[in-house]
Amino acid sequence: MPDTDTPTAIVLDGRPHAVPAGSTLADLLAALGQPAEAVATAIDGDFVPRAARAARILQPGDAVTLFRPITGG
């Protein structure tokens, strides 16, 4: 059973960041006050669709990138 008292160390946009153990990508966005539809997300360089964020539990060392989607042509 994981230690839920020990924060999980991740890298957020190139900087060290800690989240509560068991946090999902959706939890991180909520804690940061980021509206889900306002940002695109990637973990370790792999795009994570909005619908998959609640199921993606952050692991120690995950490199999370948040970026504004670019639209237009």
Image: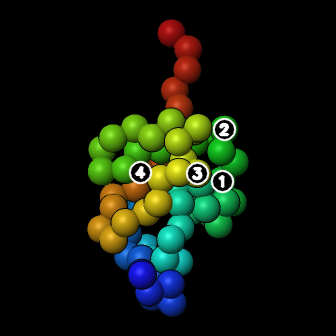
Q: Amino acid at mark 2?
A: Glu
- Helix or strand or loop: what does disc 3 sit on? helix
**3D distance between C-alphas at marks 4 and 3:** 16 Å
Compared to 64, does 17 lie above or below?
below
Q: Residue at x 33, y 61 (%)?
A: 62
- Helix or strand or loop: what does disc 1 sit on? loop
Q: Residue at x 65, y 45 (%)?
A: 36
Residue, disc 4 = 65
Compared to 70, does 33 lie above or below?
below
Q: Which mark is residue 54?
A: 3
Q: Amino acid at mark 3?
A: Ala
Residue, disc 2 = 37
Is residue 15 visible to us here? no
- Whichever of callouts 2 and 4 sits on the residue coming sooner in the sequence is 2
Residue 72, given in percent of the width and then of the height, sits at 56, 14
**3D distance between C-alphas at marks 3 and 2:** 14 Å
